[in-house]
Image: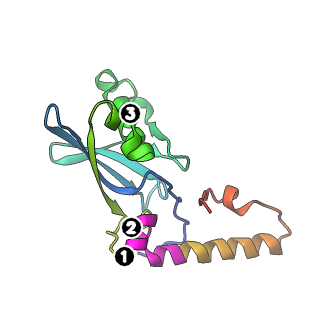
Amino acid sequence: METTAPAPTAYKIFNGLYTIINPETDKHRVFKVRTVKRGNFKGKRLVEVKESHRFRAFAFADAKDNINVWHRYRNWERGLYSKYANLLGSIARDGDASTYVTERGIQWKLAKKCRSCNRNLTIPISIEMGIGPICQQKIADYKERMKAEWQRKGMDMDLEVELGFFDED
Ligand SMILES: [Zn+2]
């Protein structure tokens, strides 16, 4: 389970399970955000919705907290998946300040997982950051290695931008 790829750094859209509840209808939807660990999409953050007993992937979450619905799902089911993306994006980005919450009374819960390895988070600081301590260290090490390599090659690059990291500090 070793990985050398840097985890995409998330800010507001965390990996994990978002349960979004409409108290008016008493219905809920479960969305999953996870980082792909292998294959063509390795490193990308997949957005899925639970349909009956399986999750359907329909979008990627990018490094700027946008949820980009895959082309074939954009107009599918009269735009249902685009609506899901708007709903989840709004709640993930704005939380209780989302208009879905303030104006429509939508409720939500989030069970966070590590944005690098998708494992459950248990340490309070890790839950807050959305990444476990081991993965955080791996990313820090990776950044150091890249920095050293670029300096050795005389390349003047913005590490955060080039690696797609957008840490808030
Ligand atoms: Zn992890």
Look at mark 3 in the image and give the residue it sits on.
99
Residue 132 picture location, percent across and down: 43, 73
The range drawn in magenta is 123-137
Residue 56 picture location, percent across and down: 28, 43
- The main secondary structure of the magenta stretch is helix
Q: Which of marks 3 and 1 precedes in the sequence? A: 3
Amino acid, disc 3: Thr
Q: Are marks 1 and 2 in contact (CB under 8 Å)?
A: yes
Q: Which of marks 3 and 2 precedes in the sequence? A: 3
Amino acid, disc 2: Ile
Disc 1 to disc 2, C-alpha distance: 6 Å
Amino acid, disc 1: Ile
Residue 103 picture location, percent across and down: 33, 30
Residue 124 in magenta stretch: yes
Residue 130 is at least partly visible in this image: no
Does residue 58 lie above or below 117 as drawn? above
Look at mark 1 in the image and give the residue it sits on.
123
At x 13%, y 37%, the residue is 26
In front of the other: 44 or 33: 33
**Quarter location, residue 6:** bottom right
Disc 2 to disc 3, C-alpha distance: 25 Å
Secondary structure, mark 2, is helix
